[in-house]
Amino acid sequence: MKENLPVTYTDHRLHIEDVSVAELVRSYGTPLYVYSASYFESRLDLYNRGKEGKEDSIQFCYGMKASSNLALLRLVASRGWGADIVSGGELFRCQKAGIDPKKIVFSGVGKTEEEIRYALESEIHLFSVESPSELRTISRIAAEMGKKAPVGIRINPDVDPKTHPYISTGLKENKFGIGHDQALEIYKEAASLPGIQIKAAGFHIGSQLLDFSSYEEAARRLLKLVHEIEAAGISIDEIDVGGGLGIDYLENHDLSQPLETPDPAAFVKQIWQWINESDANASGKKRKITFEPGRSVAGNSGFLITRVLYRKSNEDRQFFICDAAMNDLLRPSLYQAYHRVIPENQSRGSSFGDLVGPVCESGDFLARGRELPDFQEGDIAVLASAGAYGFIMGSNYNTRPRAAEVLVRGNEHSLIRKRETYDQLLENELL
């Protein structure tokens, strides 16, 4: 599908929606994360379009580990979405943002006893169970509390999503889920345990997926297993297909042209067909399907704005040293990820080099060995596709305060997270 990024040039100066980047920098300083509310909402709406006519049997749970500012979570709640969480802290955020706990799926391999109790007290929709030990712990705690814990088993389908190994989650060498060959016995054990209500089966094969074929293979393998589980007398009413739909990181994209991206509505309809209408569904049973999109909603809604402090040359290498660093945007150092670097001033030429930060690490780079705008000292650089796994993976390494966050809508902008201060960095430390 074709869609437009929320950035344009007016008189050679970059704007996010209708607000100039220069105005944002004057108002809030740098480094600065900026999100387009209109783009974020448009992605939620595209997914919702895919469940038209099937509203009662499709649930979207935003993968909030992608980006979890309360202002963004309120947009999620406004569209009727739930959330996919991986910690008690994320559950707390959801509650503060007004997301219905009955639409929350708790994923993750290491849920603590405190988190399990908190989730049971909150009456969440589902625990996505990832090990026999976790299942037994949930059973014990639920029985002690006099509750029934709604559970689904996350099955590791051993399907190669052909993505970066750090974000592949569905292979047998990954830490996630329960092996396909173990699943039937685990379901039988779950059916015998107190405090357990079996509701679902699920998988999540990875992230930044641009090819639906991996989903088809995983869905067909899971359905075959579900039929075996139901033949043993255990009903499965819901299939959790995780998230993982990718985005265009603009590596070879002309910013004046629309993006070519996977269509979320078509993705939802296709998975619905594979699970509920295909030959693989031998039972003919219509099952509820839960989707957990994160990156594909937030990724291209967000931008990291930074100021170039210095230019420096080492023989044939040009370095542009800026005030954002790996503690602000970790993905290039961690994944060797590509983020498009856009000049605020369109009139700049180009230069081959590195965009690097002030952190005392050779791995502190935002773009390395690339054709970049020929920035001058004081120029503003904008890193695109930073809405997912950007601010949220930030740290205070080198005692650096984390950036401010701003939401833009049309020609209006508002601060949604204050820039940290030095005092705040130290307030929990004791002499």
Image (cartoon, helix red, strand yellow):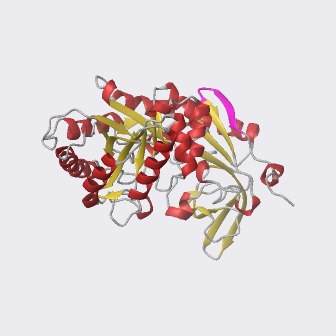
Task: Determine which quarter of the picture holds residue 185.
Answer: bottom left
- The stretch of residues the image draws in magenta is 409-417
Instruction: Report how many numbered discs are placed on residues in the image.
Output: 0
Q: Nearer the viewer, residue 214 or 172?
A: 172
In x, y percent, where is residue 163? 37, 59
Task: Verify whether residue 348 appears in magenta.
Answer: no
Task: Verify whether residue 412 appears in magenta.
Answer: yes
Q: Is residue 175 left or right of residue 410?
A: left
In x, y percent, where is residue 347? 61, 47
Q: Nearer the viewer, residue 38 or 371?
A: 38
* Residue at position x 60%, y 64% in the image: 354
Q: Is residue 381 left or right of residue 30?
A: left
Q: Is residue 28 left or right of residue 39?
A: right
* Residue at position x 55%, y 47% in the image: 115
Q: Is residue 31 above or below residue 148?
A: below
Q: Is residue 85 left or right of residue 348?
A: left
Q: Which quadrant is home to the C terminus?
A: bottom right
* Residue at position x 21%, y 52% in the image: 221
Q: Which quadrant is home to the N terminus?
A: top left
Task: Determine which quarter of the picture holds residue 314.
Answer: bottom right
Q: Is residue 411 above or below residue 169?
A: above
Q: Residue furthest top?
A: 53
Q: Is residue 351 above or below residue 21?
A: below
In x, y percent, where is residue 320? 66, 62
Q: Residue furthest bottom?
A: 315
* Residue at position x 40%, y 50% in the image: 129
Does the image show residue 368? Answer: no
Type of secondary structure dominating the magenta stretch: strand
Does the image show residue 188? Answer: yes
Q: Residue furthest right?
A: 431
In x, y percent, where is residue 204? 36, 50
